[in-house]
Image (spheres, grey):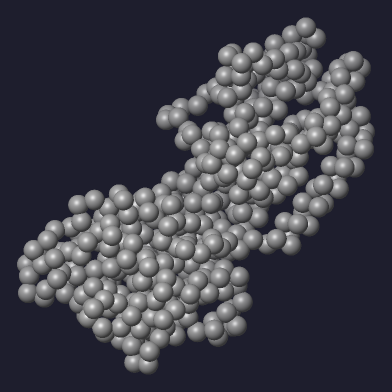
């Protein structure tokens, strides 16, 4: 499948397909036509000698410096080269592919090795683009959705492992709290637990379970709504102009704007991480509860026998807590941060920190994936000790949870009385990362009506500008 870019309908799914699955990309004919029209206006402005920021002048504190006509193209070349200030490790390959040729480093490669000649204003357009942020945000949000589906599976398995009360999934919940993410989560949990022994009368051990079990749908639902909001904003950003200045074809002029400021996306990604923090905290807490005899009613540490001095799986609580703490620190908002307002003689006194917001979401998802793997191992051990779903016959697991349990056990065997902690959880971490534990389609609650209306308005505005 070849993805055609026309500037109006690029989706998060398409960006992921390009970045991770090698889908080809072409420019749509209408996009080439729009670019040609805009370039004609640029030529007219240059011919008229009208002062335009970044076109006939320098940028930043050098905005008052008038460029010699013979130096304008060389200036744009140097503008790209002077923005190669990246530090640290190289960006992941999928992020680089997703960003395409809008990173200064990639543009540098095209200039120095590919022979690309940058025309007036094109260097500024390259370095002003937020493609690096939007690409990373697309991948991070896609991974966050996969993670949420896995956390639903692990949470449902926790309910069976704990012998929880399934009144926490009663339909009255979405009737009295009509949040889209909550309804989607409840639906998935019921599907996963279809046929579970917990639906039988008297199966629950308590009238009310700890809040991390009882409020599982609400916690996950809130995160889904936050991710849905972030994806709504990202969908708009993918199809919006981030240029400065902007060519107004209808007026045959070029105007200076601040379209490179993507505060809405930076804040939305902050929101997504904040909502994800309670999810990972609760997942770890449920695992800890299962490892504690007073809560689980099972041997301490989920040992294979009550009378043993071994720690069994207890130390998984320690590692889970450490990873959870690290993940939670990444939830701290960054969209209001600014290191200094002195750059550019005080002109460049604002920064959204959107690249950091996107990277932190990706890093947080990676850490949460490990917590989910630990949660699954603990739940599977508790299920075995309760003699559920096997030949013991005390009860059956749900259709979805049973499938997940078997997949976990293929990678991590039951810890015997004389056994030690699982030697390697990496295969399970990889399984969680791929999203293989959840058989259904990923669900993320997007305000499609709002997105559709906003994109339609954007298309109409662009058509007016072009015509």
Location of residue 263 in the rendering, given as x and y in whole percent from the top left corner: 64, 46
- Whether residue 210 is visible to the viewer of this picture, yes or no, is no
Please say if 205 is above or below 10: below
Residue at 41% across, 61% down: 437
Location of residue 22 in the rendering, given as x and y in whole percent from the top left corner: 56, 38
Residue at 45% across, 30% down: 90
Q: Nearer the viewer, residue 364 or 394?
A: 394
Residue 110, image quadrant: top right
Q: Give the position of the N terminus as an image quadrant.
A: top right
Q: Residue furthest top?
A: 70
Residue 60, image quadrant: top right
Would you say 381 lies left or right of 94 here? Answer: left
Location of residue 377 in the rendering, given as x and y in whole percent from the top left corner: 28, 63
Q: How many marks?
A: 0
- Whether residue 317 is visible to the viewer of this picture, yes or no, is yes
Please say if 259 is above or below 218: above
Would you say 316 lies left or right of 201 here? Answer: left
Residue at 66% across, 36% down: 25
Would you say 39 lies left or right of 422 here? Answer: right
Q: Give the position of the C terminus as an image quadrant.
A: top right
Location of residue 446 in the rendering, given as x and y in whole percent from the top left corner: 64, 61
Please say if 254 is above or below 391: above
Q: Residue furthest bottom?
A: 201
Residue at 78% across, 7% down: 70
Please say if 235 is above or below 50: below
Residue 405, image quadrant: bottom left
Would you say 52 lies left or right of 58 here? Answer: right
């Amino acid at each position: 499948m070849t993805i055609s870019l026309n500037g109006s309908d690029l989706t998060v799914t398409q960006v992921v397909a390009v970045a991770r699955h090698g889908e080809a990309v072409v420019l749509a004919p209408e996009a080439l036509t729009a670019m040609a029209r805009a370039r004609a206006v640029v030529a007219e402005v240059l011919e008229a000698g009208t002062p335009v920021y970044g076109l006939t002048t320098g940028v930043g504190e050098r905005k008052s410096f008038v460029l010699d006509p013979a130096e304008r193209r060389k200036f744009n070349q140097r503008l790209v080269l002077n923005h190669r200030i990246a530090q640290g490790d190289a960006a992941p390959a999928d992020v680089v592919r997703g960003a395409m040729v809008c990173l200064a480093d990639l543009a540098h490669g095209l200039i120095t090795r590919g022979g690309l000649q940058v025309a007036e204003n094109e260097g500024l357009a390259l370095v002003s683009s937020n493609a690096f942020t939007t690409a990373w945000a697309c991948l991070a949000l896609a991974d966050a959705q996969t993670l949420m589906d896995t956390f639903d599976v692990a949470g449902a398995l926790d309910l069976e492992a704990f012998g929880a009360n399934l009144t926490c999934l009663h339909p009255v919940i979405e009737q009295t709290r009509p949040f889209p993410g909550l309804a989607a989560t409840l639906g998935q949990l019921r599907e996963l637990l279809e046929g579970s022994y917990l639906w039988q009368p008297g199966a629950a051990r308590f009238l009310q379970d700890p809040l991390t079990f009882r409020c599982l749908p609400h916690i996950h639902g809130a995160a889904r709504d936050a991710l849905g909001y972030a994806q709504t904003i990202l969908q708009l950003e993918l199809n919006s102009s981030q240029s400065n200045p902007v060519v107004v074809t209808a007026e045959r002029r070029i105007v200076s704007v601040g379209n490179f400021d993507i505060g809405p996306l930076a804040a939305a990604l902050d929101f997504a991480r904040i909502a994800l923090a309670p999810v990972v905290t609760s997942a770890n807490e449920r695992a800890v509860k299962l490892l504690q005899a007073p809560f689980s009613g099972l041997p301490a540490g989920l040992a294979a026998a009550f009378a043993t001095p071994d720690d069994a799986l207890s130390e998984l609580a320690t590692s889970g807590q450490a990873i959870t703490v690290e993940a939670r620190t990444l939830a701290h908002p960054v969209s209001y941060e600014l290191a200094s307002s002195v750059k550019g003689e005080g002109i460049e006194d604002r920064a959204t920190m959107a690249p950091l917001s996107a990277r932190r979401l990706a890093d947080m998802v990676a850490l949460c994936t490990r917590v989910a793997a630990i949660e699954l191992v603990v739940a599977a051990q508790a299920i075995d000790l309760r003699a559920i779903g096997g030949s013991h016959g005390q009860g059956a697991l749900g259709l979805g949870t049973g499938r997940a349990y078997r997949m976990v056990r293929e990678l991590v065997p039951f810890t015997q009385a004389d056994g030690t902690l699982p030697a390697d959880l990496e295969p399970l971490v990889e399984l969680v990362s791929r999203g293989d534990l959840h058989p259904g389609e990923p669900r993320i609650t997007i305000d499609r009506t709002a997105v559709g209306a906003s994109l339609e308005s954007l298309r109409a505005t662009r058509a007016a500008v072009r015509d």
